Amino acid sequence: MQFKKEVEIRAPREQVWNFIWDVDRFIACVPGCKEAKTIEAGKKYAATMVEKVGPFKVEFPTSIEVLERDELNHIKAQASGADNKIGSRMKIDLDVHLRDQNGNTVVGFVANVDILGKLAALGHGIIKRKADQVLDEFAQAVKQRLEGNS
Amino acid sequence: MLRRFRLEEPETIAEASELLSRFGESAKVYAGGTELLLAMKEGLVQYERLINIKKLQNLREAKADDGMISIGALCTHHELETSPVLRHKLPALHRLEQNVANVRVRQAGTLGGNLCFAEPHADPGTLLTALGATMVAEKASGRREISAEDFFVDAYETSLQGDELLTEIRIAAPEEHFRSAYLKFGYLERPSVGVAVAFKLNGGGLTDVKIAVGCAGPSPRRVREAEALLNGKSKEEAQRSLAQAGQVAGRASQAISDLHGSQDYKEHIVGVLLKRAFQSAAG
């Protein structure tokens, strides 16, 4: 499942870049994320993602790896985790692009999300909608955090 | 495999509500179990306690009095498909119940359970929304009524509070010129799209039009914008507006592309079913 989002932030590109690069703070903007921490600065991070659809709750201990970094322009990262209780795995490939627009910074997210295992029994449509909501809230949380700080 | 759980068997609504309140998310109400036990066997949800409400009294009857039709939340689909009250007073709901899932589900599954589990592909919520039904929610400290329209919040989510039980579904007994129909379509086990219409039709035309769409998106939705295109019109005028109303209802269905069909496909089917449901109801 691929998702694309763009959010315009009233902050200069450098400030946005610095925030995104502060990876554990950046990851903490994902709704349902708890215990984000740095394993190896600039490369590896860990977090626990908790998501809920009605009575169905998943908890993914997740490892996040930064794969590419192009200063002020682009970050490519991969997150993967497994919920052994429910027997499900998830993998997210995330591309984050920055560009200038009218003195503001536009952050573009492209996320490729794969959910495997029993959780898939909920149905592709429901999971897709949930993932879309999560990405939306994530983009808005990043915007709020940055504009609140500017 | 089903994990061990403790079975609580309260004898009153207040007791059941107190158990829900005390054990919070580690407990779940259990009625027919046709959805819940499957999800538990799959390991998708785990509860330490199930609160069996089947012993609660007076929640297993469909009756008509005082201009209202009252359906106890513990009525099984089979009891409703064979209910004389439904057959005479609400033939659309009666027909819907005859076609819920399969015979095994209809024997064990309850209407209340179906509504509370809020599985997106369930049938009854859509028709009950178009019928303007009211859900009665009770807990130890009181009761309240929730319109069907407000009952469904999202996929698998209702507006019931953690300690509330759905005890009754109330529908105003249809007046003389009242018409309604529910149609569904799908090629998998569960329907891809369900559409319900209800209206009054007499010499003056259509009034009180209600249209609801379900299964295509996360939860049943009433589509007021489509209703407005038909309300107040003669039958013939309304028929000419059906294509537009169908498009509006399709867009409002929040259809999701999945194994049941693409978003475009489902939106199209909403339009087709709306037309057919209208013809079926209007005669």
Image (cartoon, rainbow, N blue to C red):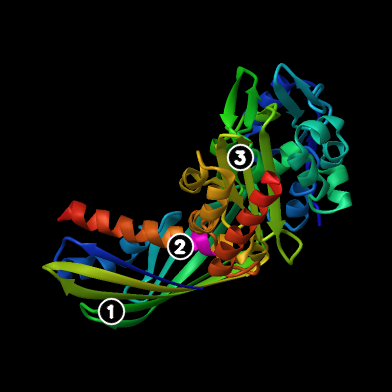
Q: Residue furthest left?
A: A103
- Between disc 3 and disc 1, the foreground one is 3
Secondary element at tag 2: helix
Query: The residue under label 2 is which amino acid type?
Result: Asp
The numbered dot on residue B129 is: 3
Residue B59 falls inside the magenta stretch: no
First reached walking from the N terminus: tag 1 or tag 2: 1
How far is mark 3 from mark 1, CA to CA? Answer: 48 Å
What amino acid type is highlighted by mark number 1?
A: His
Q: CA distance from mark 1 to mark 2?
A: 21 Å
For the residue carrying disc 1, how many other residues have a C-alpha within 10 Å: few (<14), some (14-19), or many (20+)?
some
Please indicate, yes or no, whether residue B45 appears anywhere in the rendered image: no
Kindly identify which residue carries mark 2. A132
- Which image quadrant for residue A147? bottom left
Residue under the point 24% across and 74% down: A98
Which of label 1 and label 2 is nearer to you?
A: 2
A94 relative to B106 in the view: left or right: left
* Residue placed most toward the observer, A107 or B77: B77
Q: Which mark is residue A56?
A: none
Q: Nearer the viewer, residue B25 or A108?
A: A108
Question: The magenta stretch spans which residues?
Answer: A128-132
Badge 3 amino acid: Thr
- Residue under label 1: A74
